[in-house]
Image (cartoon, rainbow, N blue to C red):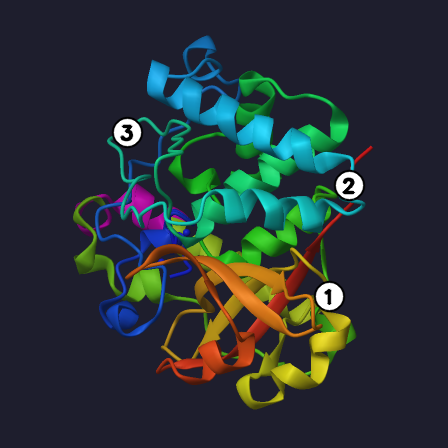
Amino acid sequence: MTHPRPHIRPGLSGLLAVCLLAVGLLGGCRPSSNTTPNADHTDSSLPDSVLTPPDSATAAQFAAAMKHGQTQTDSMESIGALMQALGRYFRGRPYLEGTLDTDPPETLVVHLDGFDCVTFIETVLAMARGLKTGNRTYAGFIRRLAEQRYRGGTLQGYCSRLHYFTEWMADNETKGVVERIDDDLGGRRLTDTLDFMSTHRARYDRLATNDSLYACVQAMEDSLQEHRRTRPVRYVPQDSIRAVYDQLRVGDIVGVATAIDGLDISHTGLVYAHDDGTKGLLHASLSDGVVVSPDLQRYIQKIDHQIGIVMARPRPVK
């Protein structure tokens, strides 16, 4: 996705949708240069065709993951702990690039055989929410996934997808799915302009020639900038992350802030809680697939262009 899903999902997938030249220097998500479907307006309801597994392999993968999650649910008090357990189940799954880069019209795309850094988060979050509510059906999983991926929870074409990950966090906070905790952690204010997609128009085949889509992207970026003025985004600098380890919980959602012009978040993952209280990063790595990087601060420090972390916490479900 990136997922930009830079972190844009230029489609978040655009974060992962935007093709970040420098993303190859990063440890995880890379936006894809072809993730820009037309500014179509598909029906907001999900067709029956996506509410059932597309093939027997996906059905088996979903059933196995949910069965594993069910064995963990009773012993896991928090949804974050369940997300970590599900994420560990997927360890070793490969990094899949550009999975959301489908031709228009925009449709909900699901892969359980591999992930980019944002689809990994979305998948384990949607599964954990289902397990906690007792809805373990594939259709329920798909509806939760769509709710998380699209602005306001409604699929209405490419421009309704949450392209920049800070918007993903903000929109899912509004929907009650997550709670942003960057204010609680303090840190520095992200002030860079969000315009990677529009300033790199030529890198996207459809964006390069589709003026209506380009205008849609520009309007989206302008809206995000305005929202930042009223609700600033703060990041914990990379050299100060260990100082907030005691405030981080298992399964907290990590957005890795970047110094690359026009981007907000270049990679994503989950806080991995070790038994000794230290914190790692559970994520879909560009080079290694789904892995646990043992120390969160050390991981951020060793990667060029990463400057710190922005945090959100999955909310309990009823």
Q: CA distance from mark 2 to mark 3?
A: 43 Å
Residue 190 lies in quadrant: bottom right
The type of residue carrying mark 1 is Ile
Provide residue 9's location: percent of width, then percent of height.
Answer: 40, 52
- Above or below for 89 versus 245: above
Lower sequence index among marks 1 and 3:
3
Q: CA distance from mark 2 to mark 1?
A: 25 Å
Secondary structure under badge 1?
loop
Lower sequence index among marks 2 and 1:
2
Task: Kindly check if marks 1 and 3 are in contact, taking CB atoms under 8 A apart as contact.
Answer: no
Q: Is residue 151 visible?
A: no
The rendered magenta stretch, by its main secondary structure, is classed as helix
Image depth: mark 2 or mark 3 in front = 2
Rendered image: mark on residue 102? none
The residue where tag 2 is placed is 75
Provide residue 134's location: percent of width, then percent of height.
Answer: 74, 23
24 horizontally vs 253: left or right: left
Q: Is residue 171 visible?
A: yes
Image depth: mark 1 or mark 3 in front = 1
Secondary structure under badge 2?
loop
Is residue 236 found inside the magenta-colored segment of the image? no
Query: Which residue is painted at 56% across and 69% down in the image?
Result: 280
- From which residue to which does the magenta span run? 207-216
Secondary structure under badge 3?
loop
Mark 1 is surrounded, within 10 Å at the Cα level, by few (under 14), some (14 to 19) or many (20 or more) other residues, namely some
Query: Which residue is painted at 61% across and 55% down in the image?
Result: 169
260 horizontally vs 300: left or right: left
Residue 54 lies in quadrant: top left
Rendered image: mark on residue 181? 1
